[in-house]
């Protein structure tokens, strides 16, 4: 019974805990613009994050090393530093976009000024991290983000049939002059699902929670179920946007447009729940990016880190996440649009994707580090395929962004 | 276990000089990227608008009008709160305003100037309507707004089709 409840709670937490502003932005835009035809890109990204999430968790459980420990050990200093600097820039951009998203949703819920709510959102997140234990933070954002499941309900209610959806899982391309924009959104969806901060946070979380070799099967379930259910929600957003927003000619350019997809089917209460789900999912991602930045810096410099200990016992780690949240709040307060910033962060994150995932792959197949828990044939094959896709996405992302003026 | 994982590793002392070098190179790259973007933007500002750009602007503004019309319909059916409608309209007005100011700061290519002016005029009317919706409004005001948004949407669609 205890295991059943544990699994149920895990599912609830996954529905809200593995979706961020990048997933919401790209999924809603892709669904409204191209219907179901980009579901395959979400599937590719999801398989990639499952494969590399599982590897990074396994390396943390067996080798007791995090992704940035591996980067430090694999690369020469200059390349390692470059990865650190780029990952920090992308993390701060993402965190700023997430804080902007939280402030926008709070503004939609309360009617108060967006500009006033930005510092309030940053301070609220700081208070949550300061006062709640690690597990509590994870549960708060995971459980309260469950409102995002409404997109799945709307998708099921409005979808014409499984055949059309299954058709979208196979790449078909588009007719006419829209194909560049189509590939821009495909790259965006894959990149948003594979954002590197997710594995920085996931592997460091494994060390925080003191995973052992006995937890390897739990890690496998976490990465499959967590990332899989997160992708299901993102898929729900694509289908709901394709069925509700697309036919009206609406191409969402504002985070407030996304929950409109549920209002027609579920009314005012549905809108409130969807907004709350988005608020906690995006808030949780802001915390994850701030933590990922602090983890990366401390692991790279060899400083004491971890949220398991009280904040004052790990002063450098605490300063690091505090500074990231304050800097991100200041960045979005300059008037940058959270949606545009999200798109830039997702597209620029592809530059560090190969630099992040390659060392994880090398470490997971290292028999000296992993012993009998090193990659098997399936993990090696999937790892290589995903790395090739990541490299192709990395090469295509920035040119596509300029060629299409961000998917126009 | 961790100590064994040293196949390609470098020693722990903090390579401050190298960190500074790499940070400077990265910043220089970002600065160069921003410089190129600024140069492109300058050229972009000076260029004359082509039919496809005007079409895109009409499409974007039309999408805002459709979205706003849907929101008004939901507000009249009491399916969204007044807070939501007001904040939503204020943000959409800001985004539509950016498209209008883009049109107003560029000259259209010969032969498309009338359409460019028409799109800018419809866009300005759309922004004004959205600003009205960003304030408290009763049902009759919402009904009038819905009719106005629908006519703006049709205008923009007609201009888009004519390009």
Image: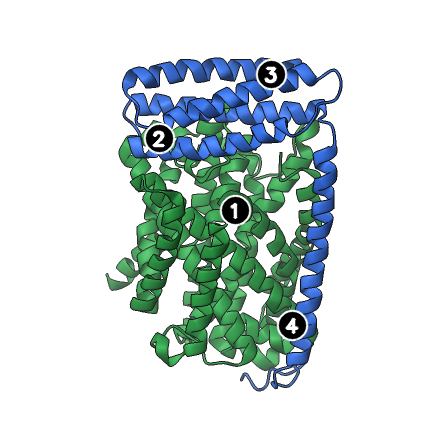
Q: Which percent across, then down, holds residue A267? A: 30, 30
Q: Is label 2 or label 4 in front? A: 2
Circle 4 chain: A
**Residue labelled with disc 2:** B85
Q: Is label 4 or label 3 in front? A: 3
Residue at 71% over, 60% down: B29
Q: Which percent across, then down, holds residue A215? A: 41, 72
Please give left or right for residue A147 compared with residue A187 in the image.
left
Find residue A311 and report its image quarter. Answer: bottom left
Crowd tier of the residue under label 1, counting other residues whose Cα lies within 10 Å: few below 14, some 14–19, many 20 or above: few
Q: Is label 3 or label 2 in front? A: 3
Q: Is label 2 or label 1 in front? A: 1
Residue at 45% over, 15% down: B150
Q: Secondary structure at mark 3?
A: helix
Above or below for A322 versus B59: below
Alpha-carbon distance for marks 2 and 4? 48 Å
Tags 2 and 1 both on a single chain: no
Q: Which chain is green?
A: A
- Numbered label attached to residue B118: 3
Alpha-carbon distance for marks 1 and 3? 29 Å
**Residue labelled with disc 4:** A80
- Numbered label attached to residue A133: none
**Looking at the image, how many numbered discs can be counted on the residues?**
4
Q: Secondary structure at mark 2?
A: helix
- Numbered label attached to residue A336: 1
Q: Please tell me the colour of chain B.
A: blue
Crowd tier of the residue under label 4, counting other residues whose Cα lies within 10 Å: few below 14, some 14–19, many 20 or above: many
Circle 3 chain: B
Crowd tier of the residue under label 3, counting other residues whose Cα lies within 10 Å: few below 14, some 14–19, many 20 or above: some
Instruction: Check whether the beta carbons of the residues at disc 4 and disc 3 lie within 8 A of each other.
Output: no
């Amino acid at each position: 019974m205890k295991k059943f409840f544990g699994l149920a709670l895990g599912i609830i937490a996954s529905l809200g805990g593995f979706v961020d502003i990048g997933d919401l932005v790209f999924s809603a835009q892709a669904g409204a613009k191209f219907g179901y035809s980009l579901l395959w890109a979400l599937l590719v990204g999801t398989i990639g994050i499952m494969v590399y999430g599982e590897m990074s968790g396994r390396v943390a459980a067996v080798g007791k090393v995090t992704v940035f420990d591996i980067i430090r050990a694999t690369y020469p200093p200059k390349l390692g530093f470059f990865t650190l600097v780029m990952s920090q820039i992308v993390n701060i951009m993402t965190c700023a976009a997430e804080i902007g998203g939280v402030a926008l949703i709070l503004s939609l819920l309360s009617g108060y000024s967006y500009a006033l709510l930005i510092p309030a959102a940053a301070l609220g997140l700081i208070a949550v991290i300061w006062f709640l234990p690690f597990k509590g933070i994870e549960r708060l954002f995971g459980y309260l983000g469950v409102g995002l499941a409404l997109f799945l309900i709307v998708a099921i209610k409005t979808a014409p049939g499984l055949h059309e959806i299954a058709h979208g899982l196979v790449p078909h391309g588009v007719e006419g002059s829209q194909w560049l924009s189509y590939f821009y959104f495909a790259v965006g969806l894959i990149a948003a699902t594979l954002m590197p901060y997710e594995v920085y946070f996931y592997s460091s979380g494994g060390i925080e929670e003191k995973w052992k070799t006995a937890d390897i099967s739990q890690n496998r379930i976490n990465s499959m179920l967590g990332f899989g259910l997160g992708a299901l929600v993102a898929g729900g957003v694509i289908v709901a946007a394709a069925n509700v927003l697309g036919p009206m000619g609406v191409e969402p350019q504002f985070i407030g447009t996304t929950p409109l997809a549920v209002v027609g089917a579920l009314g005012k209460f549905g809108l409130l729940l969807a907004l709350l789900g988005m608020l906690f999912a995006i808030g949780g991602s802001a915390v994850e990016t701030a933590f990922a930045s602090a983890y990366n810096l401390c692991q790279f410099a060899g400083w004491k880190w971890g949220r398991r200990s009280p904040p004052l016992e790990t002063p450098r780690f605490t300063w690091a996440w505090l500074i990231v949240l304050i800097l991100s709040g200041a960045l979005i307060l300059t008037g940058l649009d959270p949606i545009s910033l999200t798109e830039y962060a997702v597209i620029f994150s592809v530059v560090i994707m190969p630099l992040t995932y390659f060392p994880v792959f090398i470490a997971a197949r290292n028999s000296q580090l992993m012993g009998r828990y090193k990659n098997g044939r399936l993990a090696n094959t999937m790892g290589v395929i995903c790395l090739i896709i990541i490299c192709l996405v990395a090469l295509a992302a920035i040119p596509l962004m300029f060629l299409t003026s961000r998917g126009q | 276990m961790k100590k064994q994982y040293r196949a390609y590793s470098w020693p722990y002392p903090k390579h401050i000089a190298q960190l500074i070098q790499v940070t400077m190179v990265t910043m220089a790259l970002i600065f160069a990227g921003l410089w190129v973007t600024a140069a492109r933007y300058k050229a972009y500002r000076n260029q004359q608008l082509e039919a496809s750009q005007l079409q895109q602007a009409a499409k974007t503004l039309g999408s805002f009008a459709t979205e706003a019309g849907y929101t008004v319909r939901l507000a009249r059916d009491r399916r969204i709160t007044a807070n939501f409608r007001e904040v939503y309209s204020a943000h959409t007005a800001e985004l539509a305003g950016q498209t209008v100011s883009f049109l107003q700061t560029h000259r259209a290519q010969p032969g498309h100037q009338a359409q460019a002016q028409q799109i800018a005029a419809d866009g300005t009317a759309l922004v004004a309507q959205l600003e009205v919706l960003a304030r408290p409004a009763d049902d009759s005001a919402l009904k009038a707004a819905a009719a106005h948004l629908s006519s703006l949407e049709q205008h923009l669609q007609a201009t888009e089709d004519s390009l």
